Image (cartoon, grey):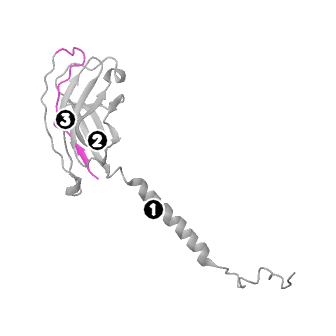
Amino acid sequence: MSILTFLRIQRPIAFLLLVSFSFSIGSVPVGAATHAADDITARITDVQYEDERVVITYDLIGAPKDVYEVKIVFLKKSDPAFRVIPETISGNVGRGEFAGSGRTIIWEFRKDNPSGFPIADDYYFQMTIKRIGGEGGGFPWLWVGIGAAAVGGGAAAVILSGNRSGGGTTGDLPAPPNVRP
């Protein structure tokens, strides 16, 4: 698994006026921490500011069936204590098969903070991407395998344990009658 973080993608955001916005689109490739098969490249391609929401578009290059966890945080460069974790978000965020281009995250920021945010030009988003698993996660199969091993082990223990009381197994039940009708 790898945790990937975008740190240098800055977008000025003026939530109160929302009149004119200028932002630079950056690309920060981030490599995986484990091995080459986990390499993930991602970049934010567009940020659109609307009256009540922000739409973030990004590309995530990875295996199409892999499951990723995508999170965003809203930060301010001049104030390290400023940290907003968006609550009212939708789109290609959370856990899912998000590899591909044109993925979107929609943040309804007015629902999280009705008064908006002070005007500043040093706001930015930090995205954290974590690869959860391949081919739909694969994680439930681990539990199926563990469960099957437990059931099989329990059945083998019962069958192989036999009667340990010292008596034979046939002495406990009466023999069938020898009389024929």
- Location of residue 176 in the rendering, given as x and y in whole percent from the top left corner: 81, 81
Residue at horizontal 23%, vertical 45%? Answer: 4
In which quarter of the view is residue 143 placed?
Answer: bottom left
Q: Which residue is mark 2?
A: 98
Q: Which residue is mark 1?
A: 145
Q: Main secondary structure of the magenta part?
A: loop
Query: Looking at the rendering, in which quadrant would you find the C terminus?
Result: bottom right
Of the residues under marks 3 and 2, which one precedes in the sequence? 3
SS state under label 2: loop
In the image, is residue 30 above or below residue 161? above
- Give, as a single range, the part of the protein colored magenta: 1-19
Q: At label 3, which amino acid type do we have? A: Ile
State the CA–CA distance, disc 3 to disc 1. 39 Å
In the image, is residue 28 above or below residue 149? above
Q: Residues within 10 Å of mark 2 (few under 14, many from 20)?
A: many
- Location of residue 15 in the rendering, given as x and y in whole percent from the top left corner: 24, 19
Of badges 3 and 2, nearer the viewer stands 2
Q: At label 2, which amino acid type do we have? A: Phe
Of badges 3 and 1, nearer the viewer stands 1
Which of 114 and 137 lies nearest the eye of the viewer? 137
- Location of residue 107 in the rendering, given as x and y in whole percent from the top left corner: 30, 27
State the CA–CA distance, disc 3 to disc 2. 14 Å
In the image, is residue 84 above or below residue 98? above
Of the residues under marks 2 and 1, which one precedes in the sequence? 2
- Location of residue 135 in the rendering, given as x and y in whole percent from the top left corner: 33, 52
Which of 82 and 105 lies nearest the eye of the viewer? 105
Q: Is residue 89 magenta?
A: no
Q: Which residue is mark 3?
A: 44
In the image, is residue 131 above or below residue 168? above
Q: At label 1, which amino acid type do we have? A: Gly
Q: Is residue 6 magenta?
A: yes
Of the residues under marks 3 and 1, which one precedes in the sequence? 3
